Image (tube, grey):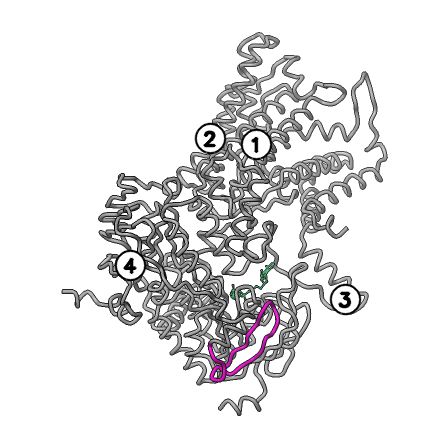
């Protein structure tokens, strides 16, 4: 039991399960899944489907944070890639043509990748602080997206494109498969090659890594490129969901959700050792929280406050110092037993 | 004087101190005491528990069992700051200052002089810093950024910070590990002054000479247990070593000869006119296959700068480097590593190890980086490789998955060496490789250096300890003010004659 509790995913999973439990208690229909025309429907399925863009963005954010960085531009990058793809489809006038769609999707992804490369260039080559460097694109990105859509909200009507976010494959939403594929690909690239451990080394101690011959610059650049590419894909999913490219609303504040998901998953903002599985759990936690808010009918105006309160609570539960403090308080109230021991441990 | 101390009440008294890290017991029921006006040394091998005892005493770690009394009262410090307020000043082994603040800010941190409106009084802060530095005879600008100074100066600043308040107990955990003779002499002068004022001083060092020079009493730890407390005057060195190691000192097979390579051995690395300003100017170095070149110089003479220039860490401003006769541009450490030229930094923690990664990951890091991201070394192979190095260098505990930061200093150094040796280098540049390493491990590392040379490696061995430079090096390069002024065979030299060469002022040369 103790070994289970020590596992780094223990508290993130506990939080997620607790959230699901609270939802189920307040409305038992939360966990019910119905089958219609061979497709699964239900709140949990919605969570799997709707979390896809955040999943992609948070996976990229994990890699960036592991290098001790941060990527604030992901939301704006989503706006850009969606704008590029939809504008191409709209301008072609043939929204169902597969080759047009292929070009549009490819161009959207390329736009995301280009944004990531730009961020990486500023940070890894010019040495600009990540928060400042990505702030540039965070602010400029939506303007670029508006330029692409010529100031309008581009809308299209294309069933194949719609399929990305809204289609079903063997009973489950296609978007969920996209999530799964992204998780698998990122995990394989990080853990089957040496990229993961080298990224951690760079994040923990860049100078020592450089002296050990690690291409720190390349690794950091790569992390931002990956983040850009993933955000690009997330932008396509978003636009496919609403069948419109809305430069102002696409991916708004998603960078905050993504950072939160990474932290909830147990990866430290100080960089270094990261957990992709933790991020996956973090993303589902946030998506569940969002659906809870919708369900509870929290007025939109106070949603941020509600969200913030829950997040503070969740982060506190995960803080070992806070748990110790609560334990001590409890101990003092029952028996005046010996104080629990404070221990500075090297993170493992 | 000693006898009166026996009667007096100890100023610090620790009883039954026990500290556990998960399942390991780092400190096991240790009793320890210190009297006012004495210099007390805590001795033991790497990992014996010295720093752990100090941390428990000063509130950096909580005791799992046992108690600490200060002046007869039981105390329980939650943080080092509490201990500080109670009169216990500590310089920890790993310098815990803030490199991006100025020297003055670091010295005054947490107790900055305030003016009437409660804002920091900068003039007074600078004065405080200036006085504290002057007390140690250190002439540096208090307004300079700490991180720009060499490690030795940072160590002195940490000491200046510790003694700039009214202290009752001063704890110095390996304060001299990167200092030269002059700074050590200055520090000892200050320690004697404080001692005369009745301060109790705890001095931890692996330099037996220093311990015997300054300490009145010695407490020996081994494997987290107390071996005993002795008066320095009554404990022979050989017995001290025996008590620390738990085996006879004779078992420390010191390698007697470090053979000079044959005359026809080829030159592996040759540097001409190497310049990286400020620090090293117009330096020429030749390394022969199978030799150990000692480097001796004072603090600030450019020892580390030379090492960094030869290994691609710093870009050359002028000069050329040939490896096996071919001119090479060492544009990065990565490039140098691929040519078989490796560097072990004097600063293990910031420029060497990746603290949170495991022993295994640290050992395989450089090799993996050389192979490239895509060609990951198979897990089984990584394990085999790391295990073989852990065994060859006797890294303890032999646990591959433990974060390297939790190892003791000597074992961390060995992990760093293992990482570099796993690359099968041709030239290895060791900057203070025995810093903070116990007598046993020091001899092991020196012997290892000899073996490497026997196997045809060229080794550059930099150390502030001249005795060691002479013992290990077949030739010694003398550094003064960033210039290699001479390269002499070490045979026939004594520490004193070498010291004279190292310290010779510019004027004498003319
Ligand atoms: N944070 C930690 N987590 C786990 N084990 C630790 C930690 N800190 C120290 N240890 C272990 O406790 C033991 C005592 O370490 P300590 O640092 O006190 O040794 P030391 O006598 O100061 O050695 P050195 O001369 O190398 O400084 C060692 O076995 C070490 O591995
Ligand atoms: Mg120590």
Q: Position of residue A284 (x, y in %)?
A: 70, 36
Mark 2 crowdedness (10 Å alpha carbons): few <14, some 14-19, many ≥20:
many
Q: Which residue is mark 2?
A: A117
Cα gap from disc 1 to disc 2, whole angstroms: 18 Å
Q: Earlier in the sequence, mark 1 or mark 2?
A: 2
Q: Secondary structure at mark 1?
A: helix
Q: Same chain for the residues at labels 4 and 1, yes or no?
A: no
Q: Point out the frontmost of discs 1 and 2.
A: 1
Residue B381 covered by magenta stretch: no
Cα gap from disc 1 to disc 3, whole angstroms: 49 Å
Residue B114 shows in the view? no
Please give the chain letter of the residue carrying mark 3.
Answer: A
Q: Residue furthest left?
A: B510
User: In the drawing, what numbered circle is on residue A189?
Assistant: 1
Q: Main secondary structure of the magenta part?
A: strand
For residue A322, which quarter of the picture?
Answer: bottom right
Please give the chain letter of the residue carrying mark 1.
Answer: A
Q: Earlier in the sequence, mark 1 or mark 3?
A: 1
User: In the drawing, what numbered circle is on residue B72?
Assistant: none
Mark 4 crowdedness (10 Å alpha carbons): few <14, some 14-19, many ≥20:
many
Q: Is residue B78 left or right of residue A118?
A: right
Q: Secondary structure at mark 4?
A: strand
What is the span of residues highlighted in magenta in the rendered image? B217-237
Q: Position of residue B461 (x, y in %)?
A: 36, 57
Give the answer, above or below, for where B224 lies relative to B279: below
User: In the drawing, what numbered circle is on residue A332?
Assistant: 3
Q: Nearer the viewer, residue A63 or B47?
A: B47
Q: Same chain for the residues at labels 1 and 3, yes or no?
A: yes
């Amino acid at each position: 039991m103790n070994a289970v509790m020590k596992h780094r995913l223990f508290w993130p999973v506990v939080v997620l399960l607790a959230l699901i439990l609270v939802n189920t208690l307040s409305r038992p229909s939360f966990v019910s899944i119905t089958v219609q025309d061979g497709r699964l429907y239900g709140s949990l399925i919605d969570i799997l489907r709707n979390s896809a863009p955040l999943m992609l963005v948070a996976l990229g954010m994990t890699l960036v944070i592991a290098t001790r960085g941060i990527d604030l531009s992901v939301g704006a990058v989503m706006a850009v890639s969606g704008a590029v793809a939809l504008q191409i489809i709209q301008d072609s006038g043939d929204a169902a043509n597969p080759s047009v769609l292929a070009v549009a999707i490819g161009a959207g992804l390329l736009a995301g990748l280009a944004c990531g490369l730009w961020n990486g260039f500023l940070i890894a080559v010019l040495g600009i602080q990540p928060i400042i460097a990505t702030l540039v694109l965070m602010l400029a990105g939506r303007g670029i997206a508006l330029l692409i859509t010529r100031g309008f909200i581009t809308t299209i009507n294309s069933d194949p494109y719609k399929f990305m976010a809204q289609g079903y494959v063997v009973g489950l939403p296609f978007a969920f498969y996209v999530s799964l594929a992204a998780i698998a690909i990122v995990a394989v690239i990080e853990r089957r090659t040496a990229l993961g451990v080298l990224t951690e080394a760079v994040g923990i101690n860049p100078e020592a890594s450089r002296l050990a011959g690690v291409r720190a610059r390349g690794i950091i650049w790569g992390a931002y490129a990956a983040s850009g590419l993933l955000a690009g894909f997330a932008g396509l999913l978003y636009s496919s969901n609403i069948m419109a490219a809305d430069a102002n609303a696409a991916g708004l504040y998603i960078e905050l959700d993504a950072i939160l998901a990474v932290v909830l998953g147990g990866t430290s903002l100080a960089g270094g050792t990261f957990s992709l599985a933790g991020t996956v759990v973090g993303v589902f936690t946030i998506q569940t929280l969002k659906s809870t808010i919708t369900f509870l009918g929290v007025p939109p105006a106070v949603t941020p406050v509600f969200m913030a309160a829950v997040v503070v609570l969740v982060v506190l539960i995960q803080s070992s110092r806070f748990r110790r403090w609560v334990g001590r308080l409890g101990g003092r109230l029952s028996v005046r037993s010996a104080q629990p021991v404070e221990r500075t441990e090297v993170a493992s | 004087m000693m006898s009166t101390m026996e009667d007096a009440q100890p100023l610090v008294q620790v009883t039954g101190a026990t500290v556990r890290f998960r399942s390991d017991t780092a400190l096991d029921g240790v009793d320890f005491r210190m009297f006012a006006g004495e210099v007390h040394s805590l001795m033991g091998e790497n990992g014996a528990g010295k720093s752990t005892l100090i941390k428990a005493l000063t509130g950096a770690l909580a005791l799992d069992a046992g108690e600490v009394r200060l002046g007869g009262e039981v105390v329980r410090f939650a943080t080092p700051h509490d201990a500080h307020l109670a009169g216990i000043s500590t310089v920890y082994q790993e310098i815990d200052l803030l490199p991006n603040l100025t020297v003055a800010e670091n010295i005054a941190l947490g107790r900055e002089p305030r003016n009437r409106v409660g804002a920091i009084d900068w003039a007074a802060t600078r004065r405080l810093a200036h006085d504290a530095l002057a007390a140690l005879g250190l002439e540096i600008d208090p307004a300079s950024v700490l991180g720009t100074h060499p490690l030795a100066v940072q160590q002195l600043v940490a000491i200046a910070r510790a003694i700039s308040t009214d202290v009752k107990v001063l704890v110095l955990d390996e304060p001299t590990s990167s200092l030269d003779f002059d700074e050590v002499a200055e520090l000892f002068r200050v320690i004697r002054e404080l001692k005369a004022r009745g301060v109790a001083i705890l001095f931890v060092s692996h330099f037996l000479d220093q311990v015997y020079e300054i300490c009145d009493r010695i407490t020996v730890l081994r494997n987290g247990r107390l071996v005993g407390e002795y008066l320095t005057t009554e404990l022979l060195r050989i017995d001290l070593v025996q008590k620390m190691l738990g085996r006879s000192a004779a078992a420390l097979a010191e390698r007697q000869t470090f053979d000079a390579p044959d005359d026809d051995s080829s030159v592996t690395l040759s540097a001409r006119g190497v310049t990286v300003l400020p620090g090293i100017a117009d330096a020429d170095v030749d390394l022969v296959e199978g030799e150990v070149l000692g480097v001796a110089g004072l603090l600030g003479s450019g020892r580390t700068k030379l090492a960094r220039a030869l290994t691609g860490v710093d870009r050359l401003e002028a000069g050329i480097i040939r490896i096996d006769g071919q001119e090479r541009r060492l544009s990065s450490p990565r490039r140098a590593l691929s040519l078989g030229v490796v560097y072990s930094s004097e600063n293990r923690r910031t420029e060497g190890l990746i603290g949170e990664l495991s022993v295994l990951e640290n050992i395989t890091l450089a090799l993996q980086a050389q192979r490239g991201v895509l060609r990951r070394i198979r897990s089984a192979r990584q394990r085999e490789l790391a295990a073989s190095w852990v065994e060859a260098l006797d890294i303890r505990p032999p646990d591959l998955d433990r974060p390297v930061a939790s190892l003791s200093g000597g074992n961390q150094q060995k992990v760093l060496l293992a990482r570099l040796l796993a690359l099968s280098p041709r030239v290895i540049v060791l900057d203070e490789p025995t810093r903070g390493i116990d007598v046993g491990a020091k001899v092991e590392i020196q012997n290892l250096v000899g073996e490497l040379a026997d196997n045809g490696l060229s080794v550059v061995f930099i150390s502030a300890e001249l005795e060691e430079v002479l013992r290990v090096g077949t030739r010694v390069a003398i550094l003064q003010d960033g210039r290699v002024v001479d390269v002499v065979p070490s045979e026939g030299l004594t520490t004193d004659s070498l010291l004279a060469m190292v310290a010779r002022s510019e004027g004498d040369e003319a």
